[in-house]
Image: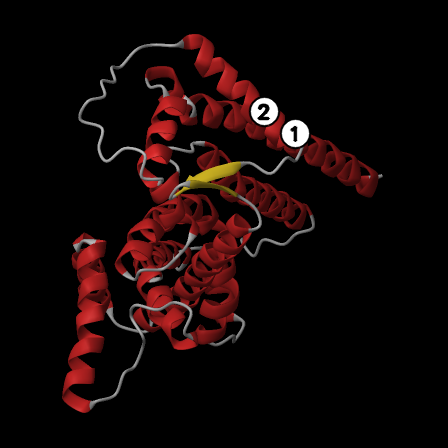
Amino acid sequence: MENIVKNSYLSEMGTYMFIRFGFQLVLTFIGILLIVSLPYLFFNIDRQLAVLLSIDKGLIKNTWFLYDSIEVNWLRYFDHINVLIHQFFTFSNPQYYDHGEYVPLFPELWNLYGRSLFMLITALFLGLGISIVCTFLIMKLGSLGRRLSQMGLFIFESLPDIFIILLLQYGVIFIFKKTGILLFNIADFYNNSAAVLPVLCLSVLPTVFLTKYLLLFFQNEEKELYVDLALGKGLSRNYVLLVHILRNALISLFNHFKTIFWLTLSNLFVLEILFNIKGVMKFITTFSPMTPDITVYVLLFFFIPYVLFFIVFEFSLKQLGLRGGSDRV
């Protein structure tokens, strides 16, 4: 009887999360369409593209003699939204303007998206792994060592991300000038070694924040009764830290990981500019002002896996909780 109740609850929970995912997806899609199409509300984008095409073909040399004013055009605005919806649901291949010609958006966008997504996911998992190791080492210290570590994390967290990236780049250049050894290629992502330094830079922010949160959760979990019970049974402190406390701390970290994901994604834009990486974030800033359709696809490509992953993970946690997956007593 108990298993039937649990299975029924899990089925209802799965249905609820599926509906919530669909609802979030629809609202996000509508919001992206409304925001991305704003240039068509205030500017005549088609006319501006025609002018750029004439300049690139050498028909005119400048636009000094042209006059363009800001005017509200609701009809063009909703017409462009309708075009985007039609393109999206008919799986048509939109085009973007690039130096005098219109180029199909796919499959180039897939390649750029895959490169940026690889960097993002690698940096997040690398930051999570490093933060777990750092948290374990800090927990082995005394109270003074923990306070100093927390102070160091606070200071490091306050440093601008651009400063850290430039500092690492300068360090590579300094070592190359002194020793002649090029640790990483800092301006060519297509070189295999060039992917290492950008990923390391991108993982700095997740490492700092994850270590900060994990350390806080570890210290809170350390006061729970189940820790004293486990130590009283003869389990080693390292085992309790790495198995029991870490498991519960990672579950508590779940809610903060969403914020860290978006912060890391925002840093990806700066990273692609500074390292001259031809990724999807740099692609947006280059072509989306005149082709807003690009932003719609890119935002959805990041949002859909993001929401789907966290909903599935949340459902898995609830399922494990029903099966007694928690260590707390």
How far from the left and from the top, in percent, is residue 2? Answer: 80, 40
Please tell me in which quadrant of the rendered image residue 315 appears: top right
Left or right of residue 36: residue 108: right
- Residue picked out by circle 1: 89
Looking at the image, is 309 positioned above or below residue 79?
Answer: below
Q: Kindly report the distance in space between the C-alpha atoms of the residues bearing marks 2 and 1.
A: 6 Å
Location of residue 10 by image quarter: top right
Q: Position of residue 301 (x, y in %)?
A: 53, 43
Direction bottom: furthest residue? 179
* Tag 2: amino acid: Ile
Indicate the amino acid at tag 1: Phe
SS assignment at label 1: helix
Q: Badge 2 local density, few (<14 within 10 Å), some, or many (20+)?
A: some
- Residue in front for this viewpoint, 160 or 212: 160
The residue located at (63%, 35%) in the rendering is 92
User: Callout 1: few (<14), some (14-19), or many (20+) C-alpha neighbours within 10 Å?
Assistant: few
